[in-house]
Amino acid sequence: MERRGLLKAVLLACLLVVCSGRAPMVTLQSSDTIYNSTLAKIMVEYASAIYTADLTQLFTWTCDRCGDLIKGFEMMDIIVDVENCLEAYVGFASDINAVVVVFRGTQENSIQNWIEDLLWKQLDLDYPGMPEARVHRGFYSAYHNTTLRDGVVGGISKTRKLNGDVPIMITGHSMGAAIASFCALDLVVNYGLDGVKLMTFGQPRIGNEAFASYFKVYLPHAIRVTNANDIVPHLPPYFTLFPQKTYHHFPREVWVHNVGLGSLIYTVEQICDDSGEDPACCRSVSGNSILDHITYLGVSMHAEAWSSCRIVMEYTELQHKMDLYGNVVLSKQPDLHSAQ
Ligand SMILES: *[C@@H]1O[C@H](CO)[C@@H](O)[C@H](O)[C@H]1NC(C)=O
Ligand SMILES: *[C@@H]1O[C@H](CO)[C@@H](O)[C@H](O)[C@H]1NC(C)=O
């Protein structure tokens, strides 16, 4: 009897090991809680739409990139900081039942120049209230020291007033990803908001290792999608020899890349470790492609025209407020409608 019992136990143990080792569903479910691939395909379309040059099309959600998975979006505010050539929008996505906040990447004359500049970005600002945490002042200020912060916070509170305390999904591509990260952290740390989620695309490094570890505490489920050989996630450079002085990504990277040969090529979304700097993810390749920076998950992520920061819109059609510097908030002003 005893031997049979033992045999049964051994068999059961074997089965368990084999089953958990072979059953793809188990692995898929556990990684789904970290990274939701369906959600990524939606968020990348939001991050792409903000490159629409014509603000009227963006505001009325009739732009070329405003259809497909994101056609049910209801715009609340577009915030344009004319002085610093920055842009963000806020609204309600009924399909994923969330406030969506999107920041635009650089609109400067040349993406190449912008990327080259990333080589020289210094860790030149102490992040307030977080000892040892240092960040790049330019990215920090683009959110904290411009009209974006007030505009976005106002847009979120209006959208939540209309739709309840739904989650807040924050996204952006390239420089927009860096700004989105500072926004997400700000909403959690300084505004104490619940349900803040961050998913970015092609993000540069923004702070040092101490900053990254604070970030991980406040936004434990943040996702940074990186693409193949995109050069931007490799910048500013990571110097292994100077751990105190170097930039360090916050987790968690999801590296999208192709594997296989010939007709057997397929795309893998590799979920990386929680260090922020998984050497088996995009750091395992040279990462020298600009082309891989401007397409994410098959969606075009670049501006329609690399030009000066021009703003195209029909002023008469839209309610807007403009401040002394010419900064604009295009707004649905729900308060006015509900008062009528
Ligand atoms: C992934 O996101 C989609 C879209 O928001 C949602 O419908 C789905 O339930 C999510 N899946 C998981 C496993 O959370
Ligand atoms: C914010 O802007 C003001 C005025 O331009 C400047 O003096 C200050 O240093 C800026 N703050 C940061 C953190 O860059």
Image (cartoon, grey):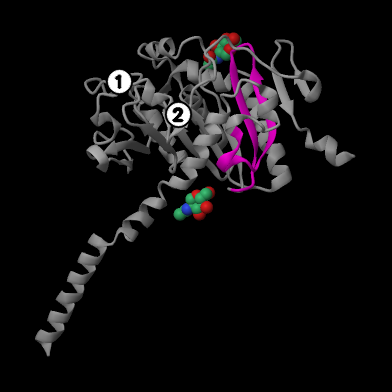
- Which comes before the other along the chain, label 1 or label 2? 2
The residue pinned by badge 1 equals 288
The residue under the point 60% across, 48% down is 95
Give the image location of residue 192, x and y in percent: 58, 39
Secondary structure at badge 1 equals loop
The residue pinned by badge 2 equals 130
Alpha carbon separation for disc pair 1 and 2: 33 Å
Q: In the rendered structure, does residue 218 fall within the stretch colored magenta?
A: no
The residue under the point 76% across, 32% down is 332
Quarter assignment of residue 282 = top left
Q: Is residue 205 visible?
A: no
Left or right: where 89 falls relative to 252: right
Give the image location of residue 330, x and y in percent: 72, 25
Secondary structure at badge 2 equals loop
Residue 122 in the image: above or below residue 34: above
Left or right: where 133 falls relative to 332: left
Give the image location of residue 175, x and y in percent: 48, 22
Pick the front one: 22 or 142: 22
Q: Which residues are magenta?
A: 66-95
Give the image location of residue 211, x and y in percent: 40, 29
Q: Residues within 10 Å of mark 2 (few under 14, many from 20)?
A: few
Per the rendering, the mark at residue 78 is: none
Q: Residues within 10 Å of mark 1 (few under 14, many from 20)?
A: some
Q: Nearer the viewer, mark 1 or mark 2?
A: 1
